[in-house]
Image: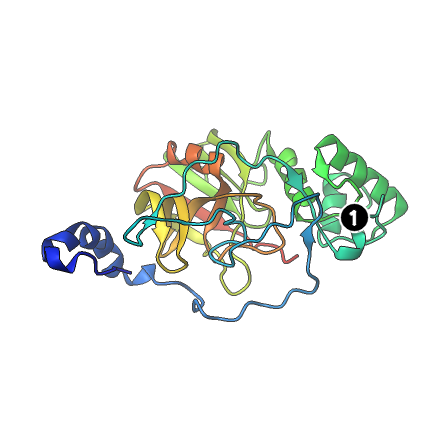
Amino acid sequence: MIRWRGRRRGVTALLPALALALPLALTPALLPSPARADAPEPEAAEVLLPGGVAAGRGEYPMDTPDQVLPPRQAEGGEPVPVPVPAKEVDELVEFLPRDAAKAACTARTGPHQRRVERLLKLKADGKQSAADCKAIRAFQQREKIKPANGYAGPVTWGRAELLAARKNPNAAGKCPARSYPVACVDLDRELMWVQKGKKLTYAVVNVRSGRAGYRTRTGWHKVYWRHKDHWSTIYDTPMPFSQFFSGGQAFHAVYGQIATPVGSRGCVNLSYRNAERLWGVLRKGDRVYVWGKRPEG
């Protein structure tokens, strides 16, 4: 979106804005895709809320559910990039049903129960038991996930997947090894890394991909445009360290936790620090390979 500023100064004042916006206007694939921006959100089976003390901050229902820092505005009304937070959010706060938040060891079966059981080498039957709760709670305590009450939510699952994949994220060989760098995005596990041949050039990290109706597109892509201080004109929200690889879908930073009950609107979200590191690894023209499907719940 181009705002008409400084009418008295004439067309010359608009040239910087036009120069930035022209590549977007000429690229049909950059429209919000594949779903309409005003499409209704899919209904969740159960609303999960942050389970830690003071964790229930208001969030912007924009590109992602974790854009918790309000946009700053300049005098002329134009958005200004949000400054780097003095300290990145590093607390792991699990999302829970309301009635499970205060339980010492919950009997509730979490949305990622079977996945967490498999990763913790428990009986993977997808049903919560007293033994499951005890084991999951011990894992949460060890990884400083709050509250540690045995609920297998998105934060616990995301942490378990990351730890299991750190030594060899491509053990299953699903990301093709090439002589050039490939950014690998595994939607099944909500993880990404960069490899050149069999060597990791960017260690595996947690990501958040597109939710139902806004799926991150799979297959081969290419980083075609990078904008360090990008601002989404579609959702009016900051997208730091944006690296676009498929139409309007990009790698970019968000402020807050990556593992949440719902996904993005197609982009691959990383924590601020991880997105900043990825900015220094990828270049325009680098290849991106995406496969799998983000699990629901």
Q: Quadrant of residue 178?
A: top left
Q: Secondary structure at mark 1?
A: loop
- Residue 26 pos. (x, y %): 23, 60
Q: Is residue 180 left or right of residue 68?
A: left
Compare residues 237 and 183 and report the one nearer the observer: 237
109 left or right, relative to 18: right
Image-quadrant location for residue 6: bottom left
Which residue is at a point 58% across and 32% down the rendered structure image?
168
Quadrant where the C terminus is found in the figure: bottom right
Using residue 31 as the reference point, say whether residue 15 is left or right of it. left
Residue 92, percent from left and from top:
65, 39
Residue 191 shows in this picture: yes
Residue position marked by numbered label 1 in the rendering: 124
- Of all residues, the one furthest to the front in this rendering is 75
Seen at 41% across and 47% down, the residue is: 239
Q: Give 91 or 223, whichever is nearer the viewer.
A: 91
Asked whether the viewer can see residue 222, the reply is no
Position in image of residue 214 (x %, y %): 49, 62
The N terminus: image quadrant: bottom left
Name which residue type carries label 1: Ala
Depth check, front residue: 15 or 201: 15
